[in-house]
Image (spheres, helix red, strand yellow):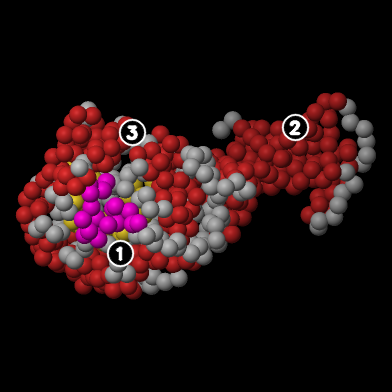
Amino acid sequence: MEWYTDAEKCQLKITELEARPQYVAAIIAFGEGEELTLEQGKLMVQMGRFTNRLAQLLGDATQAAGKRGRPWEMPVDLENFPGSDRVELTRATNEKDKDKGLRKQYAEVQHHYVAHVTTVAAVKDVQQLVVGLELPEDAIRALERVMDLAEKGRERARARAKMLAMVSDKGPELGWPMCEKLELRSYVDNEEEDKAMRKAEKLVKAEKQVAAAAAKQRDQPRGNSAGERFSYEHPVVNVPSPPMPQDDPILLRAARGEDVERPPVWLMRQAGRYMAEFRAYSEKYPFRMRSETPDIAIELSMQPFRAFKPDGVIMFSDILTPLPAIGVEFDVIRGKGPRIDQPVRSMEDVLALKPMDDLDDRCPFLRPILSTLRQEVGNEAAVLGFVGTPWTLAAYSIEGKADRHLMHTKQMMLKNPEILKAYLDHLTEAIAIYACHQIDCGAQVIQLFDSWAHHLSPAQFVEFSLPYAEKVTAAIKAKHPEVPVIFHANGGTGKLERIAAGCSADVVGLDWATDMSAAREVFGANTTLQGNMDPMILFGSQEQIEAAVKTAVDEAGRKHILGVGHGVVQGTPEESVGIFCDAARKSVYADCLAGAK
């Protein structure tokens, strides 16, 4: 490589300078922490010390490049490389990857060379400052270049130090979410340093934006605007839940099985990327920052309520949110979905799980989110909390990501069912505690999402999902008998009889593959059903949406909560959601209309 020739010149210049006693004395003084007479002289010594080490590194790299046989055995003092580079070089050595090792060493040495070797020409001029001599104009300009390069180097070093602290478990005082640490760590582990640096810079910027917004909004009362009124720090978690309003919301009354004048309406994933104001947040902040920062989560939960006035406001969160409280960390990668770096796949993993306790400490965001939502909506809507069923959370955390075949989970089911059932038992207790805590914080209705029920045959569903979900329901009812529970099994069409026989939830959610009339025959007239319109109907015309609502209401009968059979799809026109909710509000039951006349 051509730059080695210049490096040899660099070595000669350094040797010449080091022969001067005053330069050596300055190096010693600086190394021992003594103050030099002039700040510029101090900077010169710093550059001199660095270029001395640079020459050694260049010489070592040149020597390594000329070796034959096993060139990855490099005589380089790794202590002079940043932490991530030491790891990468060590890994290359251990893997006997000579090309990767040499490439990395050359790149690192060349980086230092390009950044600093141009300063060597100025060292001789800067050295005059140490003895108090005047400098010509060109020497002053050279000194300015030295100082500028040195400051940039220090800034990069600080950024690297912060990034590496971020990806360490020893840096929680930095206040960044664990999910961001995990993502940064994955970049470092995958040798994607540029991505790691960009991620760190993005989060530093976000941190500053959040802090600035918090300072701006700190003294302003909460309003109904869609502005960025949030703070990065969690507010005080000990917020008392407001009292139950005397005139309960229609969705709450319907979920309890009471007669109501029309079908209440809400939509799964009603807070989502189909809304422009939601995208303004999702494009700026990572998922867990949005769901675990109370003011952001409150704002996102309230956006569809302000826009469409549904009868239910569901907390913006995720079914995986309780997992870190039991020791299973996760992140949600944009465009890829949830990721769990350390999946649960052995009995040792199950036994290492934590019990679900002290949720105000482990999930401090829940109380301010739910209690504030209660205060915001009053009796205009019911506040819904939600959890994933033990089966769905188990499958996610065994696979480590969404998987169409559930290879690891199904193999565990067949080969080691005792491990799967032990994990399901642990999750059942944890989820029940988590759901009850949501109620304590202000949730009026709890929905259990069995999102991955469609992966199970009816027999597997009865063995590995339904009984554990039923235990969660029973635990909720034992502590909060007045709180309705909704059970929604995705892909439950072939399991209706089993759900009817083994589920004690107050409301059963149905997907759009289920014929509502057939479901009514299975569950009878006294069970409240929820759903079950195809979310894609919201891409239709106003007439099509209104006709579909009328059909669903007519087929479901009086015990019915109107909604779509799954989440609102990204790209759905916002006005269509408004048409859907308006059509539900106009669907007053005939006997109620007759009574009004």
Which sits in the foreground, 332 or 516? 516
Q: Name the residue tied to disc 3.
A: 574
Mark 3 is surrounded, within 10 Å at the Cα level, by few (under 14), some (14 to 19) or many (20 or more) other residues, namely some
Q: Which mark is residue 483?
A: 1
The answer to whether residue 476 is left or right of residue 37 is left
The answer to if 543 sits in the magenta stretch is no
Q: Position of residue 509 (x, y in %)?
A: 20, 53
Which sits in the foreground, 176 or 372? 372
Camera sees residue 238: yes
| Residue type (three-letter) at the residue carrying disc 3 | Glu
Among numbered discs 2 and 3, the one appearing first in the sequence: 2
| Residue type (three-letter) at the residue carrying disc 1 | Val
The answer to if 249 sits in the magenta stretch is yes
Quadrant (top left, top right, bottom left, bottom right) of the C terminus: top left
Q: Position of residue 7 (x, y in %)?
A: 66, 36
Which sits in the foreground, 93 or 474? 474
Q: Which residues are magenta?
A: 247-265
